[in-house]
Image: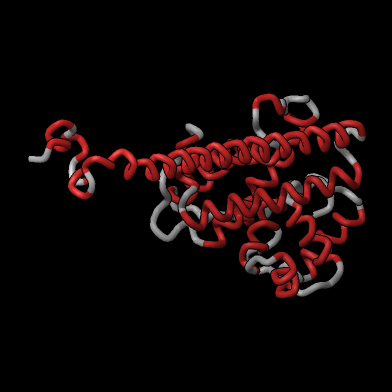
Amino acid sequence: MDRARAARPWLGEQSRRDPWRADEALQPAEDDADDGHEQREDEATRARREKIERLAADVDLHLRLALIGFTGPEYREFQTELTRYGLDVMTGWLRTGKIFAKMNEARLGIAHPPEGALDRDAQDELAGETVAIALYRFHHDVLLRGKWDPRKGASLTTYFIGQCKIRFANIYRAWLDKETGGALLVDPTAADPGIDAPTAAIDGPEWKAVARGYIRRGTRAVRDPRVHRALELIAADHTQAEIAVDLGLSEKTIERMLANNRDRIRKLGIA
């Protein structure tokens, strides 16, 4: 055994190449490690800076909206963006199945549905109802009551998605209870035996009368913006197929959404 290896056995195979210059041979690797560490630090610093910038922008937006009482065109534009974001997130989680892990992380664990029950129509309906209710609660329980605190690190959109998770838990459990109980996801005839909603086309005379009465009153009692849009289109004599294209949903999903909101519309004395 050569002198260097006997004296410094930790050099291992490196010492066979040039035992007396092993430290120099190792130096570039140490430099690379330092560079990698600096790069990770830079990425972490950049991420912190971007988060601070987002929060600062949210603080500015929140202040502007607060000054106008969280109403008006700018607030509606903000709600529209929240709706799009919320639907993208919730639909994405439902499509990929990540929703179950996300709910477990939030300590809102939910059971898996029977095989085939959570199809695309059910996913769209659950996401839409979740976002609609979350929008309402976010406005009344969070913004109007001043509960959003940027010092805690959550952006407005992150806080809103938190609201979506909370609302989804109850909405999903009610849906699952109906599914496992052998009932239809929606049974509108039970609430209103006067209209055969499963067979009545949404562009038929019954729904046109309902939609025109709703629009004529100028109300926004329906929380889901997609249902409100569907009623506007029905009142304007659009066909069921055209409405489905406009909303990017299947005709079956639109029928379900309208059926779910029929009771709320009836309370206005319209239908």
Residue nearer the viewer, 10 or 36: 10
Residue nearer the viewer, 242 or 20: 20
Q: Residue at x 21, y 42 (%)?
A: 19
Decide: is 227 above or below 153: below
| Residue 93 percent across, percent down from the top left | 53, 51
Residue nearer the viewer, 228 or 63: 63
Task: Indicate the quadrant containing the C terminus: top left, top right, bottom left or bottom right.
Answer: bottom right
Q: Is residue 67 visible?
A: yes
| Residue 33 percent across, percent down from the top left | 42, 41
Q: Residue at x 89, y 33 (%)?
A: 69
Q: How is the image coloured?
A: secondary structure
**In the image: residue 134, left or right of residue 126:** right
Task: Indicate the quadrant containing the N terminus: top left, top right, bottom left or bottom right.
Answer: top left
In the picture as drawn, the residue positioned furthest to the left comes out as 1
Q: Is residue 137 visible?
A: no
| Residue 209 percent across, percent down from the top left | 83, 63
Q: Residue at x 63, y 68 (%)?
A: 250
| Residue 43 percent across, percent down from the top left | 57, 42
**In the image: residue 90, left or right of residue 70:** left
Quarter of the image for residue 240 reads bottom right
Q: Residue at x 73, y 47 (%)?
A: 82
Decide: is 204 above or below 176: below
